[in-house]
Image (tube, grey):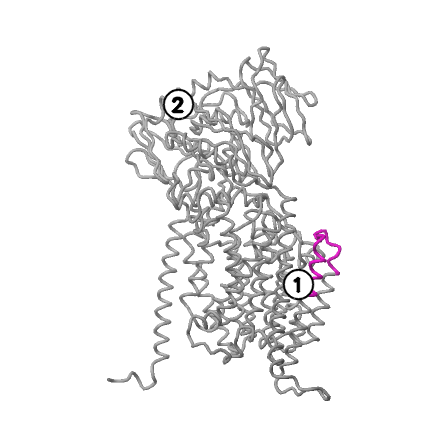
Amino acid sequence: MPPAAETVLDEVDGEEGNGGSKLRPGSPRRRLRSPAVAGPLSAALLTAVLLALATRLSRSYPFGPVTRNIVDLGQQYLPFHAYWRSFLLGETHGDAFLNWNSGFGANFLGDIGTYLSSPFDLLVVLFPADRIELALYVVTAVKITAAGAAMALLLLRMRPGPWPVAAVLGSAYALSGWTFNFGATVPMWLDGLVAFPLLCLVGEWARTGRRPVLGPVVVALAWTANFYTAYMATIGAAVVLLVRLLTAEETAGARQRLAGALRAARGVLIGIGLAAPLVVVVFLGTKVADPTPETTFVPAAWVEVLARFLPATASLASPALFIGTPALALALTLPFNGAVAPRVRAGWSAAVVLVTLSLQWEPTHLLWHAGASPNGGPYRQTFVLCGLLIVAGWFSAARGVPRPPALLAGGALLGLLAWAAHGSMDIDRWTYPAFGVAAALALAAALVALLHHRRTTAGEPPAPGTAPVSPARALTTARVLPVLAVFLLVAAQAGEAAVTGKRMEEQQRDKVSWSPRIGPWHTAVADEVARADAWPKYRTEPGEVPGGNDVLIVGGQGADYYSSLTAEVTSRTLASLGFGYYAKGRHPVTLDNPVTDVLFSIGTRVRSVPTEPVRQDALPRATVSVATTPVPPLVTVRPTKRPATHPGDSAFAEQERLLGADVYELPAVSRDGRTVSARCPAGSQAWFWAPEYRGGATLAGEPRVDFEGKPPAVRAPMRALGTVPGSGEVRIELSPERKVRLPRQPVGCLVPARLDSAVRQLTATGATEVRATGHTVTAELPPGSTGTAVLAAPRISGWRCAAGDAEPRPARAYEGLVAIPLDGRATTVTCSFRPPGLKLGGAVGLAALLALIATGVLHRRARRRTEQPADGPAVA
């Protein structure tokens, strides 16, 4: 079949085949107009424009007043990028190993490898601190744009064809439903979106025996940027390579196929090895992270799966398969396109079908997710299937617009899919109108291209009884029709993508939790924290700021910390002391309690109260106050553990055990319906601890205090209800929103005088000086100190400590905190943190580097032997 679309679109480029341009070979203009450059650049430009348009239509920042910070984008990624900027500019207390701002001390290298190791994330240093939201949006947009360019480049390298079609398909991949539904709000996963076409390109190099050094480097960059989605992208690239080995003409022999597969395996192994210094640290970090409840995979109903091929559908419970109606229509024509070799049609069609089925079968679902079904969206690998559909569409269109029979068959399948999906709960009011308009425009584009092909078929005589067409008119037709076809194709794909992006953002804002934009509230708290910061003399706690993980934005050294690598010891230790959490334990939050302030050396606490309701379309504002109280130093000395006066599993008793003093009265509690009663010393502070309780609690004569317990995801922190009256009667009225579940000891009454005495004792025996540099803490102790030195930081894996000149050893634990035994002779203690897996990962990385160098040397030698004349080198 004559390559109709290729001819049409080459003419749009100003070339006809290889000889239509009069530009000098190698000139800048010719390089820019070559398909290998023009296609990716056009895909990038189209993608960037459509992403910005979708953001503008949804009135989201930075093109509107409404926040984009839904769920983890506001709770995790935005704060981490704010801290990343500060870290890169040398403005943090910690270093690449340890983050002192979060969770009272967290493994930062693990978080770098999980959230921040993408080369694109370095762009944050180009923005001021108060524009970090804009910085993150730009990072997100650049990643999506790069994915579109990478896919367009891959398509043109897999099979020559019309670069405008490759550009449109590249943009369709980058702006898939997966991108709008997941990637745009989980920016770290977007590196997998970029990685998939690049890893497929590495497979092409391996198949043809090219670039044996660059290939592993690309793999290493992909796995370093985000190994989680790079793992999925690698599986997808293996599928693509397998199909190419079985169907491409260049690898027809079994020996050639095997050699290509082995070269690919070598490149992947070396590349992963190069990424090992980060990958191993993250892997071991997940082993000690707070475990989330096990999830059993339940496949989505097929009607929901089919619906996700359509525009403007959003859901976490089904795969986001939208790639645009024109791109999907091309993919559906492939099985019926007689212009494509049967083995190619069979190979790509089988790959698409099998990968689609693998999304719905539990064993393969677990394979895609490295053996663990994730909490939340179970279809995180969907971008790979979107990429396969794009490749299938390209193979159907690369040789020209499919003939009418293929178009009719593909259109029938598309119509059947749309009809079968009409009962889905994910169908939006915009879905079918957008689908219908896009389908009509795509059909018009195909008809125009076919008409142009028909009129420009070589040697076609005029119809009998008609006058010959003049050369000028023929030339005009040859230029207008292809431009019109391209315009209709772009309009179909672009309009549908923009509508989908707009509706997905709007739907997500309506259905899930969100955080407000960074505004005057954050600025006011950050200013006060900066003025009060006295680290490492004591900690400064910024308190509650909307968005979570707030210490990473406003500074300080508080408890807030939200990461997939939140250590179990951190989560469990803080929860046992009365701290609350979100995300099933991986997001501990601050606790405004004087006892825990003493335990963690929080000398300054910032408190803020909103001055107006927090809204999606407004910057949050608040009044801010600062309180400073005497606390012991960061390192204290404790005697041998003593039996607890208040035994049991209550948070009050646990605080006392760690403090080493009895500071609460723990009264007997009685319940009568919704009333909790007890008796405490007059003037003491009544505290209520009910981690699973959701509702209000009101101490007689005091304002209502709200609790947000929602097990297992949310644990409510201990909260103060007010001062015990002179009668000593504690009467708490509950206003529950669900069934009441209280612990055995929900009430504790803090006696301030007892706490003051404990503070004086710990200060007198604690460190006389504390120094902190990056990931190391050194403390000077009073002479003759015995017992246990305790560093007010959770004892996460990686801490090594020594007393005096002793050899550092893995730190011990004291009620969950870092501990160092003392023998009365040492006057200093030193603790240093090294992320677990760093030595092992470094060793693997070094071995991979040596293997890469050896590969390069051997390849160069082999190439020299191949290029050397048979009769040997010429003699001068």
Q: Quadrant of the N terminus?
A: bottom right
Disc 2 crowd rating (10 Å Cα; few below 14, some 14-19, many 20+) is many
Give above or below for 820 relative to 383: above
Q: Is residue 809 visible?
A: no
In the rendered image, the residue lying farthest to the top is 727
Read off the residue under disc 1. 325
Label 2 secondary element: helix
Q: Quadrant of residue 742?
A: top right
Give above or below for 154 relative to 754: below
Read off the residue under disc 2. 762
* 817 left or right of 306 in image: left
Give whichever of discs 1 and 2 has the lower sequence position.
Answer: 1
Give above or below for 835 relative to 591: below
The part of the chain drawn in magenta is 419-440
Name the kind of residue labelled 1 in the image: Thr
Q: Are marks 1 and 2 in contact (CB under 8 Å)?
A: no
